[in-house]
Amino acid sequence: MRKVLKNCLVVSEDLSIEKRDLYVEGERLVDFVEGDIEDMNSMIVIPGLINTHTHAAMTLFRGVAEDVALDEWLSEYIFPRELKLTEEDVYIGSLLGFMEMVKNGITTFVDMYFFPHAVAQAAKDIGIRGIITRGLANVDGHGSEKLKECEDFIHEYASDPLIKGGVGPHALYTCSNDYFKESVEVAHSNNSLLTFHLLESPSERNNFKKRSNIEPVDFLNSIGAFDEKTIVAHGTHLNNEELKLLSQHKTTISYNPTSNAKLGNGIAPIPQALSEGVNITLGTDSAASNNSLNLFSEMKFGSLIQRACKEDPTIMKVEELFKMATYNARRPLPFDIGKIESGMLADLVVINPNKLSTLPKKHFYSHLVYSFDTTAIEKVMIGGKWIYDGDFCTVDICEVMERFEKTVDSIDSRI
Amino acid sequence: MRKVLKNCLVVSEDLSIEKRDLYVEGERLVDFVEGDIEDMNSMIVIPGLINTHTHAAMTLFRGVAEDVALDEWLSEYIFPRELKLTEEDVYIGSLLGFMEMVKNGITTFVDMYFFPHAVAQAAKDIGIRGIITRGLANVDGHGSEKLKECEDFIHEYASDPLIKGGVGPHALYTCSNDYFKESVEVAHSNNSLLTFHLLESPSERNNFKKRSNIEPVDFLNSIGAFDEKTIVAHGTHLNNEELKLLSQHKTTISYNPTSNAKLGNGIAPIPQALSEGVNITLGTDSAASNNSLNLFSEMKFGSLIQRACKEDPTIMKVEELFKMATYNARRPLPFDIGKIESGMLADLVVINPNKLSTLPKKHFYSHLVYSFDTTAIEKVMIGGKWIYDGDFCTVDICEVMERFEKTVDSIDSRI
């Protein structure tokens, strides 16, 4: 498993683009090795994109109900289907989701859902890297079993090269305060990633204060929920003081602009977060609320909505947006990813710059963010293996699509 | 030139989808004809999308400067380049722009720029349908020549099957009031489409009031600028009373959500406009301020930004967004387009619904708006001719891209 990729135009962490060869040994980039030579013909090589918040299996619910209020969407359409899901359903939904991600240049994900072994199997069958957090909630009275399942999963996958377990208490409104605290302790004692939804929708702050007589962020801070290994998903309604606190704790936000917009949850305070020094990354959320799994469109839309809202075209820089999808996202994660350097994992996306929508070629970063068409993605490598080269190298796409359609029909027939 | 397209899944004006054959004779759909039979294998056929506001040649400036203030962007980067453009440059820029549009399912455009003959040549070389308005302004003292060029162009193309001329006074801030009035009269006397930028940026209203001591919309109304053949581009800062007036006059708005956002101009009042009954259509604006020429992303983003801003996921319906890109846009235009019916022009987009991002197939309209990937576009027909089938049928894409790159380098060397 030694590969030499000749004539790459390599994107570096300082965003310079340099023509050189890349050497891969096993799952990592190395300084030099002799191996199978492949000519990359001056294609541009960027680090694989990192999707810091998703629920891959929810591709099963893509398009189920549009244009309805959030409560109705959840209670009438999503929850009734989720109650009927089998482990097999979650496997096939995750599989399709991961395929779409890979095709769109995503090489690492952070997932929160149930049936974590099915999610892991789907990821391993494709060959995508990820953190899988068993979604935790105790409103249904089954909190302890879930937490045990979560911790067992972490142990089971501790030495897996692609998959790690993490801890995902769903949100303050689906967990009791004691249960949330217990979840945080499990993350700490296992030295694992912690991730949860926070202030995603407008009503969450007041609902929590009414219940607990304390601000949500103050409660979370009191139980040690914010540190370098924490990813706060959404954070749509965080205020400046709270952003400052997250910055002090080196906590990461997963900015999910499309989902926040589509569900009518609002616009996250990203320019303020950036000026407070918070580490900002990007997430697609699920295909039920996006409905794509494409970080190039998150970069674009994540910029546009801030510029429109503030009537200021200078507040979201092209380079910063690209870093959100790559370099920034490696910080909370236990993988050597997000940049192309010797010693790092070989997670690479090969881009053909010679496409209608990415001309003139001289403004490459601008096109990556504002006019990228994923047909420009020629190949995707994860951990030293080619996973996608226009077709999928690890699975039969037609077979998966057929099985997926049957699964959706079956779920719909159960409700 | 008789064609039978067997086994189409045809999208009708009421948005039902029905399996049937389509018959094409010359440039139009007919009830029945014998001809070359092509099996469409249950692909979905939608009417070609209509881009009601663009400046195609500005693909030449895609990515030129991001993240700078609007004034600086125009005065430092765009205007200096435009001053140096030749007719040949405008041809090649328009050609690439139209190719990108066709590839993305756009079959009709409304363009405003200069060198209208070069724009028309590019459109005819590709085979795309459009209204070409010679952009009119008299701040530089050459207003009359431009207006004459505009009117001559209208006459010259009066009987062209693909191209019509229109009248495009650029904006109130680049035309004197008398000149704007004269332009409107030219549109009326030629029974032509009239289109202009209106209240695109936040400062335009007050600047005009200071100059003319009257509200912009009141002035335009007094000179008869609003009627069924008028397309107002942007309209970002129109108020409710003004929307009511536009509705009464059956005037169309071209909603350009991406450009409005990217340039920091704000968010157009589309939910209000819809409830006042204004005819809303979609425009990409130019690749310099978008930077794509893709109405599928305008549908998605045009919905998302309204939902986010109003924190309401019910205000932009999937079906309404699709109509903005098709049926609504035919109203002000002098072509029988925007729906698939006998007697209409055969402008068709053939979609393969069997793609990762458009599964499960049952929610087709939702996917068109929220997860569409233009690789699902298999073929594009304009006026009864296949223009695109994965490759371009009318031009050599490699040759155009090479010439385009050279042109951009040449322009940049002139400034």
Image (cartoon, coloured by chain):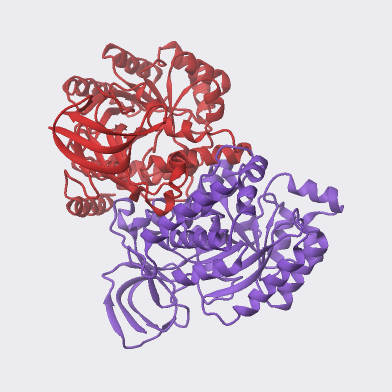
Chain colours: A purple, B red
Please determine whether, in this image, residue B242 is positioned above or below residue B286: above
Residue B152 percent across, percent down from the top left: 19, 21
**The one of B114 and A210 positioned closer to us in this rendering:** A210
* Residue B321 position in % (x across, y down): 46, 34
Q: Position of residue A74 (x, y in %)?
A: 64, 45
**Residue drawn at the location 30% of the way across and 16% of the way down:** B187
Asked whether the viewer can see residue B182, the reply is yes
Which quadrant does the N terminus of chain A fall into? bottom left
Residue occupying image coordinates x 53% and y 55%: A284
Kindly tell me whether residue A258 is visible in this rendering. no
Q: Is residue A114 left or right of residue B152?
A: right
Q: For residue A46, what is the image quadrant?
A: bottom left
Q: With respect to residue B23, does A292 lie above or below?
A: below
A391 or B407: nearer the eye? Answer: A391
Q: Give the total of numbered labels.
A: 0
Relative side of B402 to A30, left or right: left
Place of residue A80 in the rendered image (x, y in percent of width and height, measured from the top left): 64, 48
**Where B300 falls versus B335 (above or below)?**
below
| Furthest residue toward right | A213
Tell me what residue is drawn at x 20 percent, y 30 percent: B24
